Image: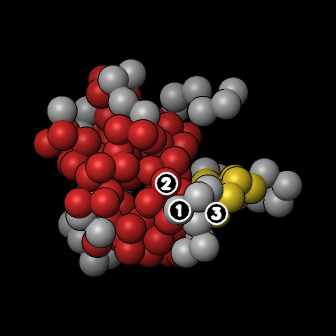
């Protein structure tokens, strides 16, 4: 499962111009995100994010480079929020936790999964 989770965590890089330039839709399909999603949550991503610190920067870059009016955003201060909804922001205890939460909420949004907390 760790290998699949790491592949999912690399979506931020793979969909960027610095990575493979895949569309988010293609990256979600390649990683079988929808099939895997019921088996993990943000807490399961934390050990991998801590083990691979470059993932933090990849997801911050992904968030900063977004050109859409939907989904979520991530800040270097460990805050996530819903794009276009100023009052929906969450401050997490660490940047690692924020990245884990952001990855799940962002990918769930674009994959059409019911979002965390809904």
- Quick one: label 2 or label 3, which is nearer the N terminus? 3
Residue 98 pos. (x, y %): 53, 57
Q: At numbered mark 3, what does the secondary structure look like: helix, strand or loop?
A: strand
- Callout 2: 10 Å neighbours few (<14), some, many (20+)? many
Viewer-nearest residue: 45 or 93? 93
Q: Using the rendered view, name the quadrant where residue 43 is placed.
A: top left
Q: At numbered mark 2, what does the secondary structure look like: helix, strand or loop?
A: helix
Residue at image point 45% right, 41% down? 42
Gap in Å between the C-alphas at discs 3 and 1? 9 Å
Q: Is residue 73 visible?
A: no
Residue at image point 54% right, 43% down? 105
Q: Using the rendered view, name the quadrant where residue 78 is placed.
A: bottom right
Viewer-nearest residue: 13 or 41? 41
Q: Is residue 107 above or below residue 113?
A: below
- Quick one: label 3 or label 1, which is nearer the N terminus? 3
Residue labelled with disc 2: 97
Q: Name the side, left or right, on which 109 lies relative to 27.
A: right
Q: Name the side, left or right, on which 29 lies relative to 88.
A: left
Contact check, label 1 and label 2, Cβ < 8 Å:
yes
Q: Is residue 35 above or below residue 76?
A: above
Gap in Å between the C-alphas at discs 1 and 2? 5 Å
Viewer-nearest residue: 62 or 70? 62
Residue at image point 36% right, 30% down? 40
Residue labelled with disc 1: 94
Contact check, label 2 and label 3, Cβ < 8 Å:
no
Q: At numbered mark 1, what does the secondary structure look like: helix, strand or loop?
A: loop
Pair 2/3: label in front: 2
Q: Is residue 94 above or below residue 45?
A: below
Mark carried by residue 79: 3
Mark carried by residue 53: none
Gap in Å between the C-alphas at discs 2 and 3? 9 Å
Residue placed furthest toward the front: 93
């Amino acid at each position: 499962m760790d290998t699949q989770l790491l592949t999912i965590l690399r979506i931020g890089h793979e969909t960027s111009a610095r990575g493979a330039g895949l569309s988010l839709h293609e990256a979600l399909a390649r990683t079988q995100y929808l099939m895997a999603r019921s088996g993990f949550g943000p807490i399961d991503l934390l050990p991998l994010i801590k083990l691979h610190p470059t993932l933090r920067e990849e997801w911050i870059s992904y968030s900063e480079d977004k050109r859409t009016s939907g989904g979520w955003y991530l800040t270097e201060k460990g805050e996530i929020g819903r794009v276009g909804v100023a009052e929906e922001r969450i401050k997490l205890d660490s940047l690692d936790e924020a990245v884990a939460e952001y990855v799940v909420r962002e990918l769930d949004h674009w994959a059409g999964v019911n979002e965390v907390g809904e």
